[in-house]
Amino acid sequence: MKQFFLIVFLFSFGFVQSQEFTRADTLRGSITPERAWWDVLYYDLDVTVSTEEKFIKGSTTITYKVLDKAERMQIDLQAPMRIDKIVQNEKELSFTSEGAAHFITLQQKQKKSKDYQITIYFSGKPQEAKNAPWDGGWSWKKDTNANHFIATSNQGIGASIWWPNKDHAYDEPDNGATVKITVPKGLTAVANGRMTKNSDNKETSTYEWSVVNPINNYGININIGDYVNFKEKYEGLKGFLDMDYWVLRDNLEKAKEQFKQAPQMMEAFEHWFGPYPFYEDSFKLVEVPYLGMEHQSSVTYGNKYKNGYLGRDLSGTGWGLKFDFIIIHEAGHEWFANNITHVDVADMWIHEGFTAYSEGLYVDYHFGKEAGAEYTIGTRRSIRNDRPLIGTYNVHQEGSSDMYYKGANILHTLRTWIDDDKKWRDILTGLNTEFRHQTITSKQLENYIAKKSGLELTAFWEQYLRTTKVPTFVYKMNGSSLDYKYETTVEGFNMPLEVFINGTENELKPTTQWQSVSHGSPISEVSVNTNYFVRVEKEK
C-alpha cells in the first residue's frame, strides 16, 4: 500500500518526539471526499451471534441524506471482518478496498437533499479484546455458572472493528439507531436505548433495541449474558427518567445495593450539567466482563461492586473511596462524549477532561466544595506532561492520556479564576444546551467558555492544551517585599494568582517580567492557592 509520512514534532522542555502517519491513518481520521457528500440519518444493525464459534454475521442498513453529487461512498470495516455484499435498490454494488476503507461504486443517481438507503452484509470472527476496554473488540467470557458472558467495546479502535459504518466521529445518525441481536436461547442481549421487541425462535432469541437520539458509533454496543433486570424511576429535571439495570443473576443483591449510587449520580450531574440528555432512550447500567465504558444509554459496568477504581482511590485523598468510580465516571460521559462529542479524536480531552472533572463535582455536590477540590487536586499525581492534550488532526490520533486529570485540573483552575460558582455552573449547563446532541471542536468549546466567562483565554488554552509546560510562579523574598514572575509560559499568558504572604491573601498578576509587591513587614512565608494548577519555585 502506498504510504506517505507526516512527521509531527512535539516539544517538551527540549525533548522531541516524532510520529509517522500513513495513508491508512488519513483514511481513518479525515473527512474524505467519499464521506463528506452524505449525512448519516439512521443505522439499522442486525447481528446474529454464534457464541461457541465466536462468529458473527449480519447487516447494516444505512439511511442517509445526499449533501452533494457523488458516485463513490466510503464505508469502514476492519479485518478480519469482511463485507459479503452491498445492496441498494435490490441491486448488488461493486466495491474496492484499501485496508479498512471500502469504496462503493453507486449505480443509482444520488440527488441532492434526497434520502436513500444502502445495506452492507458482513460476517467474520471479530477481533477479540485482549485487555478491554483499552484495546477494543469482543470479550468472549464465561460467568461463574459457565454461561456465556460477552460484550463489545471499541472506543479508539473504532466501531468498524466489528460492524460496517461511517467510522468518523463528526457524523452521528441524526435520528438514532436500531440494534437487533440474535443469540442462543437462554441468553439475554442488551444494547442501547429501549427494548422494542423480544422474540423466541426454535433455538435462538432475538432482542431489538432502539435509540431515537443521535449516537456516536463507538457508543453502539452489544452485551450478552445470563442477565436479570431491575429498574426504578428517577424524578429528574425533565420528569420521570427510566433507570434500568441489567446484571448477572448471581450479582443481583450486590447490584441493588451498589447501584443506589446511580440516582445520586443523576442528581449531582443534573445539578452541574443540566438535564440528562437522553430521557427518551432511558438510562442503563449493564454488567460486563471488563471494567466499563460510556456506551450511550447503555453504560457498561465491571467495577466488581466496589467503591473507588477497583477498590483504589485515584486521588490518594480518601474521597475517591466515597463513590463507585465506574458508575460516576462512565455515566458522566453521557453529558461529555455522548451529548457533546468531539469532531476529531484529537480533541478527546472534551470527553475525558470534563468527565474526569465530573468526579470532583460529584464529590463537591455530595460532600462539599472543599472535598471536591481536594479530590481533583489529588488526581494531579497522575499527570505526566508527556505530550499536549490536543492530538494531531485528521489522522485519528489522540492527545496525551493527561487529557483525564490534567484536563480536570485545567477546568478546576478556570473555576477558581472565574471565582463565581453560579457563573461556572451556568457555563457547564450552557455547554450542554448550546451544543446538545452535536459534534464540536475544542476551539468551539474554548470560545464558548471565554465568551461566557468574560475572560481573555486564548493564551490560557494554548498553554494548558497545546503545550506540556506548566506555568511556574517564581518568587524571591527581599525583606518586606516580594519579587515574582511567571516562567515556562506562552506569550500573553495572563492568569492572576491568589498568593498568601505571611498568611495574608494578595491577588497578583504575574507576567514574565519581575514585579514587586510590598508587604509592610519582613516576609517569612509565601504560598499560592493550591486550586490553581501551577508550579511554585522559590528562587535561590
Image: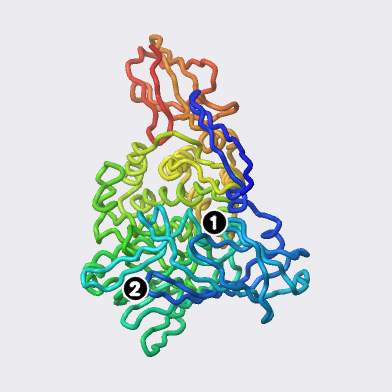
Label 1 is placed on what type of residue?
Thr
Mark 1 or mark 2: whose residue is earlier in sequence: 2
Q: Report crowding for label 1: few under 14, some 14 to 19, many 20 or more residues within 10 A (C-alpha).
A: many
Q: Is residue 277 visible?
A: no
| Rendered location of residue 421, percent (x, y) | 46, 47
- Residue at screen point 61% across, 49% down: 1
Q: Is residue 150 above or below residue 384?
A: below
Q: Is residue 230 above or below residue 410?
A: below
Quadrant of the rendering where the C terminus is positioned: top left
Check the image and name the residue furthest to the bottom: 202
Q: Which residue is mark 2?
A: 52
Q: Report crowding for label 2: few under 14, some 14 to 19, many 20 or more residues within 10 A (C-alpha).
A: few
| Rendered location of residue 329, percent (x, y) | 38, 55
- Residue at screen point 26% across, 64% down: 258
Please identify the quarter of the rendering in which residue 55 is found. Answer: bottom left
Provide the secondary structure element on which disc 1 rests.
Answer: strand
- Residue at screen point 36% across, 53% down: 362
Q: Is residue 261 visible?
A: yes
